[in-house]
Amino acid sequence: MTTLDPDVARAPRGLDAPAAAPPRRGRRRGRGVPYLLLAPALLLLLGFMLVPIGYSLWLSLRAKRVADGSLLGAREEQFVGLQNYANALSDPVFWEALGRMVLYGAVVVVVMFGLAVVFALLLDYGRTRLTGVWRTLIFIPYAVPGVIASLMWGFLYLPAVSPIHQLFEKVGLTAPDFLGSGTVLFSTANIAVWGGLGFNMIILYTALRGVPVELYEAARLDGASEVGIALRIKLPLIAPALVMTMVFALIAMIQVYNEPTALEPLSHAITSSWMPMMKVYNDAFVQGNTYLAAAESVLLAALTFAVSMGVMRVSRRFTGGDDA
């Protein structure tokens, strides 16, 4: 009979023995857990994004035509290739809407982006008081739905009920026609700036709060002014947030629909095809040409992707993230 060493016998079990490898079945089962957790998101992505995109591409390549070529023949859906895209790109109304959208976007992006940067820097300034109150007041308009905000501003623009017009009349001046052909685009842009400014400001302000305060203190010791700190330290360090807000603003510019549609009954200057998205809706649900509308929507989606990628690539070059 073998006698065990007392020290070995008193040692707790499992300390000196190598850990047992987990069974292979458990490993195989664990590999499928991430896919199981991702399944709901992937199904939503497939059902609400990839499938509609694919269906739009399929519709844009088809059209309804007479099957036998006669005047009274039955109309059926046929493959027409890129004909819908050619019709969209040769339509002067579509190009007018695109040009109007670019002008609208230039006003909205410049004004909203500039004000968001200024407000974020002011809130991040150490001597600013009641920052929580100011932050909430600036952000509140973003919580108002776009259609409701457009209707609110529409009543402010309408001469019959506008307090702005009444104020001008009391001082003996003539109020500008906010809904006229020369001013309605800027009136529409004002609604977008009012509604989207708070969201962009919060993104920039949050990014600024993540910058180490020691950098500011070191810059002040070196004699840097507050303006110099903002331009040379704060803004370069929050470049990713600046790029993100710029991309969001450009996407909102291309997809503008709520504001002009809500103002359309109040202004004769806004037509049913005043903006590209309005033309897509008019072609699809008023004119009944869903195939042309699908081609126009695909063109707008391609424009959105190209603009977003272009802004991100240019920003990487300026920030040193891309050497190409």
Image (spheres, grey):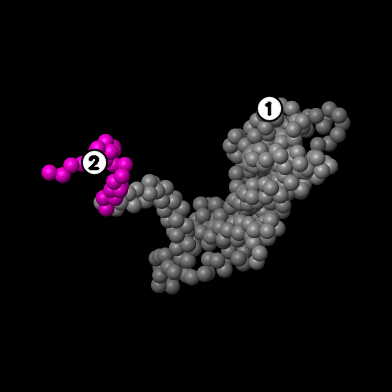
Label 2: which residue?
5
**In which quarter of the view is residue 74 placed?**
bottom left
The residue range painted magenta reads: 1-24
| Along the line of sight, the residue nearer the viewer: 136 or 85 | 136
Q: Report which residue position mark 1 lands on.
A: 133
Is residue 282 part of the magenta span, yes or no? Answer: no
Q: Residue at x 67, y 50 (%)?
A: 239
Q: Nearer the viewer, mark 1 or mark 2?
A: 2
Lower sequence index among marks 1 and 2: 2
Indicate the amino acid at tag 1. Answer: Val
Measure the C-alpha gap from mark 1 to mark 2: 75 Å
Question: Residue 25, image x and y in percent?
Answer: 25, 51
Q: Amino acid at mark 2?
A: Asp
Nearest the eye: 223 or 267 = 223
Pick the quarter of the image with the N terminus: top left
Point out the residue furthest to the right here.
172
Does the image show residue 120? no
In the depicted view, which residue is nearer to us: 172 or 6? 6
User: In the image, is residue 83 above or below residue 306?
Assistant: below
Q: Residues within 10 Å of mark 2 (few under 14, many from 20)?
A: few
Residue at 73%, 49% in the rendered image: 110
Q: Does the magenta stretch mainly form a helix, a strand or a loop? A: loop
Q: Does residue 7 belong to the magenta stretch?
A: yes
Give x and y (percent) for residue 29: 29, 50
Element under label 1?
helix
Q: Is residue 259 visible?
A: yes
